[in-house]
Image: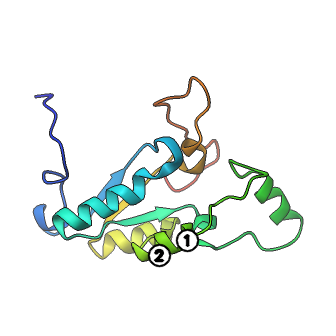
Amino acid sequence: DGSLERGVHSIPLPQTVGGRPVLFAGNHQLYGIDGPLLVREVLNERGVLIKALVYPPLMGKGFGDGADATSQRSSMPLHPLPYPPSGTAEIFEMYGARPISARVLVQLLAAGEPVLIFPGGAREVFKRKGEAYRLFWPDAPDLMR
């Protein structure tokens, strides 16, 4: 009916849909703090921990060494500034986040877990002028294709 409902009390969770898994897909807003805020709100209000799947470097998985690592670092959204900010991995780990991969997604959904993904990823976090509310889908096949 188009009415707006505030809060997280009406969102579907596995226990409200017959134990089936639930996949949440979002569009990052400014600085990407929306993911942790949503996970925390659902945990506080509903007692359910949504498992967020995040870009591996945000989980402290790093890039390793060598030419490939240098190339990957230079493609980070804030390069050459330090990214991710200090403490990011610890916050994600505290709320049960996992590095994003198709294998992890399938495992969590098969276990009946609610899962949160942001298909636009890190690029979507740092929108440029005129990009508000725009989705960023990768050109190459990835988790969502």
Which numbered disc covers residue 39? none
- Does residue 65 appear in this view? yes
Mark 1, residue position? 89
Label 1 neighbourhood size at 10 Å, few (<14), some (14-19), many (20+)? some
Drawn side of residue 63 relative to residue 113, left or right: right
Drawn side of residue 6 relative to residue 83, left or right: left
Q: Quadrant of residue 45?
A: bottom left
Are dots 1 and 2 in contact, CB under 8 Å? Answer: yes
Q: Position of residue 121 (x, y in %)?
A: 54, 50
User: Which residue sits at x=62%, y=67%?
Assistant: 86
Q: Position of residue 4 (x, y in %)?
A: 16, 34
Drawn side of residue 63 relative to residue 68, left or right: left
Name the kind of residue labelled 1 in the image. Ala
Q: Is residue 121 above or below residue 136?
A: below
Q: Quadrant of residue 15?
A: bottom left
Q: Is residue 96 above or below residue 83?
A: below
Name the kind of residue labelled 2 in the image. Glu
Nearest the viewer among 144 and 12 is: 12
Circle 2 sits in a helix, a strand or a loop, which is it? helix
The residue furthest front is: 86
User: Which residue sits at x=41%, y=69%?
Assistant: 106
Q: Quadrant of residue 59?
A: bottom right
Task: Identify the image quadrant of the N terminus.
Answer: top left
Q: Position of residue 131 (x, y in %)?
A: 55, 28
- Does residue 145 appear in this view? no
Mark 2, residue position? 93
User: Which residue sits at x=70%, y=71%?
Assistant: 62
